[in-house]
Amino acid sequence: MKEKLFYLAIVAILYCSFPNLQASTTVMPEFSKAGFFEVKDSGRDIFNFNVGWRFYKGEASQAELPGFDDSDWELVNCPHGLEWISTEASGCNNYQGEAWYRKHFTIDPSIEGKVLNLYFEAVMGKCKVWLDGELLGEHFGGYLPFSVELTGKVKAGEKHVLAVWADNSNDPDYPPGKAQDVLDFSYFGGIYRDVWLIATNHIYVSDANRARKVAGGGLFARTSSISDNEAVINVQADIRNEAKIDENVLVQLVLKSAEGEVVSRSSVPLKIGAGSSATISREIKIKGAKLWTPDDPYLYKLEVLVLNKKKQSLDGVATKVGVRIIDFRGKDGFYLNNEPYQGKLVGANRHQDHAYVGNALPNLGQWLDACILKEAGCDIVRAAHYPVDPAFMDACDALGLFYIVATPGWQFWNDKPIFAERIYEDIRNMVRRDRNHPCVLMWEPILNETWYPVDFARIVHNIVHEECPGQGVFTVCDWEARGQENFDVIYSHPFQYGFWDYKYDNTPENVKKMSLDYEKEDRCFFNREWGDCVDNWNSHNSPSRVSRGWGEHAQLVQVKHYSNPDYLYTCWEALYQAPRQHVGGALWHSFDHQRGYHPDPFYGGIADVFRQPKYSYYLFASQRDVSDKNLPMVYIAHEMTPFSEKDVTVFTNCDEVRLIVLGKDTLVQKPADLGMKMPHPVVVFKDVFDFMDMKELYRKNNAADANMIAEGLINGKVVARYLKKPALRPAKIVLTLENKGVAPEANGSDFVTVVASVTDAEGNVKRLNNSSIRFEVEGEGEILGGPESEANPRKVEWGTAPVLIRSTLKPGLIKVRASVIDEGVHTPAAGELIFETVPAKDRMIYSEEGRASASVSLSVVNVDKNNDTEDLSRKVTELETELRQYKLKEVERQQQEFEGK
């Protein structure tokens, strides 16, 4: 015993020298900037303008003037919300009102004299922008981009001040228009998306929104046809000449494969008049094209280069091209690339808010959201209820998620002409912004659940087709909406048209008769929002609305409701009972989110506001068939606690499930035998768990059998295995980095979620635990949420406590330590995690003062990345935990002796 204690003591010392080091990665997704992807050495300069803004929440007289004293204002980076919000920020408890941003900056001599445009991806509400006291422009609406021109107004070496006034308070004169206290989501506020400074020569590819050309401006690329031998891409590029003389240029179109090889190259001579623009149109033909599908989202890169007479590049931009053709063929259903789509298009809606930061989610966060939904088995995402961040659209293209683009609006109409005019402008701008994305499946130009005038429906449908002419463009609206006859696809629940024929008779007593006759309808249907099931529109109680912290039973109720409930409701099974004419549906909702008019957040997500999964997440993931890209899976939705169900629920995409309970009961079920049409029905083993049986195993010193094993079989062979053990005494805190293998950039904006799990000595999460976790950070990162918020310390819910860690402007290591409050001899051992940020890819513009907005290094984390310390640190942590539990084991032995065991 003395030798063991000595060894453990030595290990405890080693633990201090080799903390847990998580391997980092340099893999990063690619995002567009101000509507385009960058082309190297093109003559166009793009600068990140996010860093180093002075911020003030409230009224500030004369803050637009250059001499205004903002030295006591907070330093912030964009994307930026107006405040840290709690995880229960519903009920209109967020700030609404005026806010100010001021940025002090100088420009590089290399861009002086160029055409300069400052591009805001979105500012919430209405806003005005000044440069050195001069009003450059104003904008109404919080979801679409706008830009202001700085050409000739800034000089290299001189200090300039940009001031932005933003107001997210209620205003019925622009969409969405509805006051937040009667709105089902929250406006939040601020410069909550990226800001870019674009410098071009006087001849350049125009921005589609600034060009304001119907079906034109910027770069427009669409697949027009696909055959066995060839695909055809129609390309249109608008070139602007800001010079005072006519110019002759050469426009090159270069299509590259995902691997970077040139697939097609062509050149078009073009003469552009002074102060005007000209457009080229060409067809690009691709032999043996690789097609874009949700399972294989292959992307080409189309570069447009503008060359002068000396073949020097004046400008260059790029867009991603997915070669794909979509079609909705009525009763024959949805076709992709001229083939019937297999199965249904099932996915979820998505609001953009996130825990603590509200809507101010950086590009990395947008990418991670898309990854989570893709891994959950979604093939489609519907916008709720506004155009999304362009980085999310980029992610949908790259990951293979269809997307439904929506106009800002929810249950509100204003008869003032200015309101309709601004809606029409929004629709044109969102089509121009998103028209190149292969992920776009449908356009939803109506105002969600709104009784708008009949002619409005006709107008907005026509606007979409005017801006995006040709085949493969589809508008969609509710079947009961005014003017629905104008739209290409109809939103509907499947049972509204007699599609439900599995458990219930389609009689007037069971199903409300609808005004539209399904048998006479030739359009396809899609369910825009399925899953929610409130008792009334005041209390909003629903079997779908389950906070993750409510635990095992509540989450299983949500699973049953989403999969195949014992009552008539749209669910996975109902969608698959529908014929091909009903092409699919989007769950309401993907993630828990905040709301304006109700005190409760919406808890119906398959993941919470931190994107931590609920059981329903694994239900969705199990519906994806096994393929070369989709692995077989099996998951046990049971925690083996004294309060767990006697039934054991298992999700799998395998043909057969074998369950071994407590080492003796071997049970087998085949999902196909359940007689359902959903891809992979939920398997429930009835009355197979009893906590008292497990207690007996422990009392008889047979702990090895105190577990459950689920095996997934295909063609009689085990291809997936899941081991579930009950969580014993809380022994340690385990930290995990939820970044999907993508390293955050040192740009002052990227943040990642680190989850602290309270576990037993073997790493099984102790779901029934009420600890509070204190987080500490060293190195090139900081905790988001503020020291006095709920962020730190964070209460454990269902075994975990998440924290958000943001990068600084310096790449390097970040060490996170998590411990319980009031650590003691027998409290869980603290956990540590080290990860790395990578250098920012963007060129940035900020003053030295701005550097302080994201430079919070507390100390240097001295870890040699080249040493293979990860395995050793894991072993050290395990042994250190054993050392802390040594006295408990002695007590346990004495108790057993007392009981005569």
Image (cartoon, helix red, strand yellow):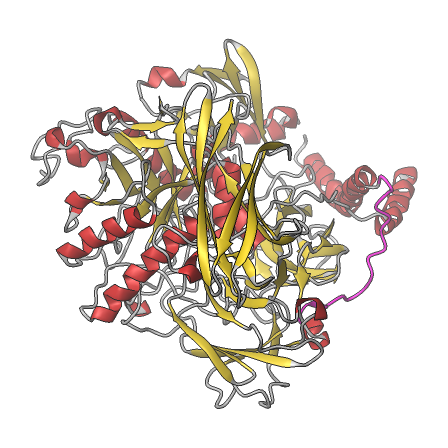
Residue 599, x across and y down, in percent? 35, 64
Quadrant location of the N terminus? top right
Residue at 32%, 61% (x, y): give it. 425
Residue at 36%, 48% (x, y): give it. 405
Q: Is residue 592 visible?
A: no
Residue 160 in the figure: left or right of residue 24: left
Task: Tell me if residue 865 is in the magenta stretch.
Answer: yes
How many marks are shown on the rendered structure?
0
76 in relation to 611, above or below: below
Please report the bounds of the magenta region as a residue range: 853-868
Q: In front: 827, or 574? A: 574
Q: In front: 207, or 610? A: 207
Residue 498, x across and y down, in percent? 15, 30
298 in relation to 463, above or below: above
Task: Tell me if residue 500 is in the magenta stretch.
Answer: no
739 in relation to 387, above or below: above
Residue at 61%, 24% (x, y): give it. 705
Quadrant location of the C terminus? top right
Residue 295 in the figure: left or right of residue 843: left
Residue 659 in the figure: left or right of residue 590: right
Q: Is residue 797 visible?
A: yes
Residue 282 falls in image quadrant: top left
Main SS type for the magenta part?
Answer: loop
Residue 164, x across and y down, in percent? 50, 77
Instruction: Specify the farthest residue to the top.
Output: 716
